[in-house]
Image (cartoon, rainbow, N blue to C red):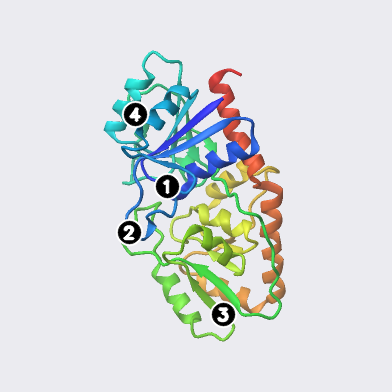
């Protein structure tokens, strides 16, 4: 079985990680194609394990299309490449799968972008975070983290909190990550002798995980009721993961875990984030306990060799094998 993942942009390497997991943990072959890289400080940071579409790589890409069994489209692709796909898949028994990751423009209605593509999709998938609540007929699939899990208790060092500042105009109801209350709270702790605030703006993803391994608390967004890939990364690194995941988001996370367990997220919203952080900082025993729970949860529920099976199950059903 050959799978070709295609995405307009890198989507912070989410499709690439699925591609890598397929090649590493299954007998199937997979490639990942990115049509255009990010600009600015994200350029060249999320395409290490993917093929970037250029005039030079076009022939290789056409060969991959001709050899593939399944084309797995992530989020969206441009009209020119849709035309190329139509040309090279016509009269061939190639199956199409669509997967939604995020929304460029938001509600109250959430448009199924696959409807704008001229392909017959055998299955439609949604990232198992907040997205499935809008597409009830989509199959839930997880983001995959490939780094080695780790746990380092902190008995006497400064407590390190890792975060990435968000802009006020960073998104809509479900994609915003900005919180004035969080920013104010972190500014407050910057003057503390017990806490180090680690700003990860612009850091390469490969370096970021190494930094996270030596921190204690990962803060995802606390504004929407959802959570993002950073929460998975925090669990893997044995960090306390703080987010605002609501009941539905937590149920979605539980549904894709191996043992159908709730993740040990620490819940906070804008009005409570300062109090939540103070309690963790003042109780080192509790801090290390939750850090260990995060690590154990990842080991027991989110290992890539297990999560990738959810994709393989979809592919097998599509191909009737």
- Tag 3 residue: 195
What is the total number of numbered labels drawn onto the structure image?
4
* Tag shown at residue 115: 4
Mark toward the start of the polypeptide (2 vs 1) = 1
Mark toward the start of the polypeptide (3 vs 2) = 2
- Tag 2 residue: 40
Q: Looking at this view, is 49 or 267 the one in front?
A: 49
Q: Looking at this view, is 24 or 300 the one in front?
A: 24
How many residues crowd mark 2 within 10 Å: few (<14), some (14–19), many (20+)?
few
- Tag 1 residue: 11
Question: Which residue is situated farthest in the left direction here?
Answer: 80
Q: Give the foreground label among 1 and 3.
A: 1
Q: Residue sitting at 61 percent across and 41 percent down?
A: 256
Mark toward the start of the polypeptide (3 vs 4) = 4
Q: Position of residue 40 (x, y in %)?
A: 32, 59
Q: Residue sitting at 68 percent across and 42 percent down?
A: 258
Residue 246 seen anywhere in this rendered image of the structure: yes
How many residues crowd mark 1 within 10 Å: few (<14), some (14–19), many (20+)?
some
User: Quadrant where the N terminus lies?
Assistant: top right
């Amino acid at each position: 079985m050959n799978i070709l993942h295609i995405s307009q942009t890198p989507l912070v390497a989410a499709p690439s990680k699925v591609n890598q997991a397929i090649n590493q943990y299954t007998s199937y072959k997979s490639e990942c194609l990115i049509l255009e890289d990010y600009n600015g400080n994200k350029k060249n940071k999320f395409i290490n394990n993917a093929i970037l579409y250029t005039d030079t790589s076009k022939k290789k890409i056409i060969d991959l299309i001709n050899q593939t069994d399944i084309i797995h489209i992530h989020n969206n692709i441009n009209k020119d490449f849709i035309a190329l796909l139509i040309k090279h898949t016509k009269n061939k028994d190639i199956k199409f799968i669509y997967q939604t990751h995020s929304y460029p423009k938001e509600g109250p209605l959430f448009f199924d972008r696959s409807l704008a593509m001229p392909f017959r999709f055998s299955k439609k998938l949604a990232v198992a975070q907040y997205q499935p609540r809008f597409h009830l007929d989509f199959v839930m699939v997880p983001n995959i983290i490939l780094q080695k899990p780790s746990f380092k208790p902190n008995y006497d060092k400064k407590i390190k909190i890792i975060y990435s500042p968000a802009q006020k105009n960073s998104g809509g109801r479900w994609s915003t990550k900005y919180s004035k209350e969080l920013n104010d709270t972190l500014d407050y702790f910057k003057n503390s002798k017990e806490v180090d605030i680690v700003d990860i703006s612009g850091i390469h993803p490969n370096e970021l995980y190494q930094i996270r391994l030596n921190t204690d608390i990962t803060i995802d967004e606390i504004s929407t009721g959802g959570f993002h890939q950073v929460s998975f990364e925090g669990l893997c690194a044995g960090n306390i993961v703080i987010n605002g995941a609501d009941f539905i988001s937590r149920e979605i996370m539980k549904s894709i875990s191996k043992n159908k367990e709730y993740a040990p997220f620490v819940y906070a919203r804008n009005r409570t984030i300062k109090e939540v952080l103070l309690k963790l900082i003042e109780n080192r025993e509790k801090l290390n306990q939750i850090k260990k729970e995060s690590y154990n949860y990842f080991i027991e529920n989110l290992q890539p060799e297990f999560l990738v099976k959810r994709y393989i199950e979809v592919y097998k059903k599509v191909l009737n094998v």
